[in-house]
Image (cartoon, helix red, strand yellow):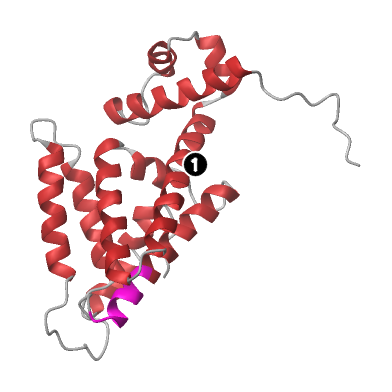
Amino acid sequence: MAHTDPNRRRPRTDQRRNRQALLNAACEVFAEYGLDAPLDEIAKRAGLGNATLYRHFSDRRGLIIEVVLGSLSRHEHALTEALAQGDGWSGFTSFLKWLFTEQVSEVNHLAALRAIPAGENAEVDRLRHKTLTGLEELIARAKSEGAFRPDRWVEDVFLMLFLNEQLSRLGETPQRAASQRFLELTLAAVSADRIEQPSHEPDNILTLRHTLGHDLAGLPRVT
């Protein structure tokens, strides 16, 4: 029979509540002011003191990683639901819709993800890789069904996500409406309509594969 270590205590309810309040506040403050936002503002937004913040997160880096892990966990859940769809196109569109909405809700999510280089945190690496491979699988399924244009690639989707991130930062623009319209244009651009299979991937796609595709997810470039 396993014995509980008496020296290991589960966090008290108030500690767990304070930690979650700090993470929620960090998401809001980072979205408004960027990743260099004052930590004092995060503590204030959570209704807690600076000492409480530093008891949970010893430095800014640790806080950013926790915020990213929360976002990637949501990615994992959304991706699991998308992969469980009856067909690849339905799964792809549902996941892309979720990603576009997430970008508007958390403007600096991808910036935070890019701020954590590969190899720094094993769990970030695992979830990041799962998201990328899952997206590629959804596209492959949709292509095999004839629903996704054969001359479009995951790198094209990365371009759309990058542009949607920029739309989400426009202060004087109705971001959600603009993002929703851009989503419609994106889906129209990748939807198949009697498009012939290309004989090979064009050079610009290969260039994007080793640059923007990796940059967007915070991975090292491939030479």
Give the side of residue 55 with respect to residue 200, left or right. right
**Location of residue 115 by image quarter:** top left
Q: Nearer the viewer, residue 119 or 130?
A: 130
Q: Which residue is mark 1?
A: 69
Dominant secondary-structure state across the stretch colored magenta: helix
Q: Position of residue 121 (x, y in %)?
A: 57, 46
Q: Position of residue 6 (x, y in %)?
A: 86, 24
Q: Residue at x 14, y 84 (%)?
A: 195
Q: Residue at x 40, y 47 (%)?
A: 114
Q: Nearer the viewer, residue 219 or 15?
A: 15
**Location of residue 190 by image quarter:** bottom left
Give the side of residue 159 with respect to residue 16, left or right. left
Above or below, 94 against 19 in this view is below
Outermost residue on the bottom side: it is: 199
Q: Of helix, strand and loop, which one carries label 1? A: helix
* Residue 99 within the magenta-colored segment of the rendering: no
Q: Position of residue 58 (x, y in %)?
A: 58, 23
Q: Residue at x 10, y 41 (%)?
A: 177
Q: Quadrant of the N terminus?
A: top right
Q: Residue at x 41, y 49 (%)?
A: 75
Above or below, 49 against 38 in this view is above
Q: Nearer the viewer, residue 130 or 159?
A: 130
Q: What residue range appears in magenta?
A: 138-146
Q: Residues within 10 Å of mark 1 (few under 14, many from 20)?
A: some
The amino acid type found where label 1 is placed reads Leu
